[in-house]
Amino acid sequence: MGGMQVVPKFIITNKTSGREETVTLDKETITIGRADNCDIVLDGKSVSRKHAEVVRMKKSFFLVDSESGNGTFLNGRKLKPHEKNPLSPNDRFQIEDFNIRFVMTEEAKKAFSEEENTDSDVIEIKMIKKVLSALQTEAHPSLEAIDPPFEGRKVFFTEEMQELVIGRDPLCAFPLDETTVSRRHALLQKKWGGVVVVDLSSKNGTFVNGERVEEKLLKNSDIVMVGSVKLRYRNPQEINLEALSKDYDSSNSLSAPTKEPSLETIAPPPTISKEAQLSVQPDLKEEKKEEKKLEMLPPQFPSSVPEAIEKIRLYLTRFSTLELALLAGGVLVIFFSLIFILSILL
């Protein structure tokens, strides 16, 4: 099995004519474009003469955009020119009006899987590419199938796309070959500052979190069901503030637990009779009168230096910082004015 040659197949669908063809090629580098000398010729005016290529490294395959005019899209994500992007079975890439699915035979898949598990160089390259892909696509919403046989199939709703159609028709941006799915079942659309799912009068309906909908604004982690196929919607741009606040509150409660006082430890408030309350009022008034009298009295001359300093400190505490600053400024102005006058007179 280790010596088996992995030969890929490309299922090419023309979205305009609906024509589908399968191409099997056993080459180290497979060129794709409008030119007649390309291995896969795509007859489209907007396709570059040499648009892209598939490169084989041992038993792994990589898709590379050849600096095309209108770009190459892998699973809905636009590729950077000359960058190697790892291909997995059933990956889909789009070149203008052509959808191309990368597939393998069962024997080739097994050999491909074995090679992935044994070749450390390829594993490292794939891991790096996956991390880079995640960094590039983390800002884009996506739909991912979570049930067999479509489990793991994923499409990104990029900035270049205005809508994304889901259906049984292979020309859809997210095709699902399932009898319970209508040919054009539903679509994702940019609306209301987010992404909306719209049912396209499908036979079996479109559901969001178990509720049948005609049109609904999606939130991160919503489960969208078309026919019998469940899809998970992801939008990394959304931030669940409510969940964060709950996590923050729970972390605070765990880090600083509080013990509720028992009824036995709480002393009842003292009861004050009306007569006592009335008797207290005159005393409070008298205290206020005494405070006013003390404020009006001039400061007495201190009997010692420490006492004088303390008196000055207490006197200055009556003023705010701003008032003290203004007072100090005034004193300096008067001081320098006196020096100026003395210098003129002398």
Image: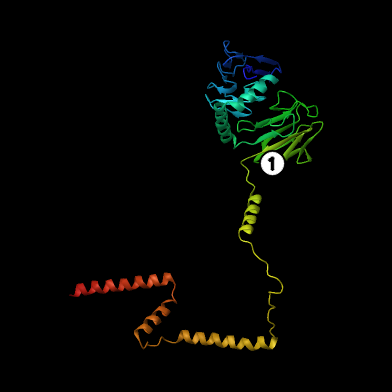
Residue 309 location (% of width, % of height) = 37, 81
Q: Hey, which quadrant is residue 160 in on the image?
A: top right
| 266 or 199, nearer to the observer | 266
Q: Is residue 248 above or below residue 180?
A: below
Res 153 → quadrant: top right
Q: Residue at x 61, y 24 (%)?
A: 115
**In the rendered structure, which amino acid carries the disc numbered 1?**
Ser
Q: How is the image coloured?
A: rainbow
Q: Position of residue 293 (x, y in %)?
A: 49, 87
Return the residue nearer the eye: 89 or 50.
89
- The spot of residue 140 in percent (x, y) is 61, 36
Q: Secondary structure at mark 1?
A: loop
- Quarter of the C terminus within the rendering: bottom left
Find the residue positioned furthest to the top.
Answer: 36
Residue 53 visible, this orientation? no
Q: Residues within 10 Å of mark 1 (few under 14, many from 20)?
A: some
Q: Please indicate whether residue 316 sits to the left or right of residue 263 in the image.
A: left
| Residue at image location 67% in from the left, 31% down from the top | 154
Frontmost residue, 90 versus 241: 90
In the picture, the quarter occupied by the N terminus is top right
Q: Position of residue 257 (x, y in %)?
A: 63, 62
The residue labelled by disc 1 is 221
